[in-house]
Amino acid sequence: MIARGHMRGRGPATAFFCGALLLLAGAASGDPLPSKMIFFVPGLDCPEGSTPATDAAGRMLLVVNNSGDVGKTFGTPLTDQEDRTHTHSGKMSVNLSAHSISGANGPNNQATKKGTQTASITSGASTSGLPFIQLLVCQAN
């Protein structure tokens, strides 16, 4: 199966999801898989000649432009069926005009001041809600 998309600033991007078809093709031709090749399988076990790629479990796999970046990890891997929550934060500003408020027992000292007022805000935590499939990531020996 081939999934096609577009990466901002990178032109067309094509991702190949290797699985049973690749394994069948290799087995049929008698050729071994390239050493250290990463591929996905829908089952619970990696096929003969490969082992689970444990460093990839729970992580998004990305193509790198610099070979020195191969194998680098960032953050905490996702757990089984996890759709991790996240928040968004930022600053807002509003310019308030002058106005008078009188209280029954004297001046209202709790009102905001005129002029530009700023505040930092953070949204509530939420998940992406995107559908996903979990596959076993294997690496050829």
Image (cartoon, grey):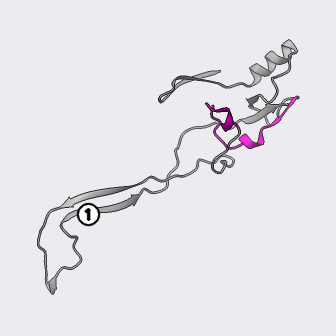
Give the magenta-colored segment's residue range. Answer: 48-70
Q: Is residue 65 left or right of 40 when viewed as pictured?
A: left
Crowd class of label 1 (few under 14; some 14 to 19; many from 20; radius 10 Å): few
* Residue 109: x %, y % from top left: 21, 79
Q: Position of residue 42 (x, y in %)?
A: 74, 31
Which quadrant of the structure image shows residue 47? Answer: top right
Q: Quadrant of the C terminus?
A: top right
How many numbered discs sit on the rendered protein?
A: 1
> In the rendered image, which residue does mark 1 sit on?
117
Which residue is outermost to the bottom? 105
Residue 138 in the image: state x and y as whole percent. 78, 33
Q: Is 100 displayed left or right of 126 in the figure?
A: left
In the displayed structure image, the side of residue 22 where residue 95 appears, left or right: left
Residue drawn at 69 percent across, 47 percent down: 80
Q: Which quarter of the figure is the N terminus placed in?
A: top right
Residue 34 sits in quarter: top right
The three-letter code of the residue at mark 1 reads: Gln
Seen at 49% across and 55% down, the residue is: 125
Main secondary structure found in the magenta portion: loop
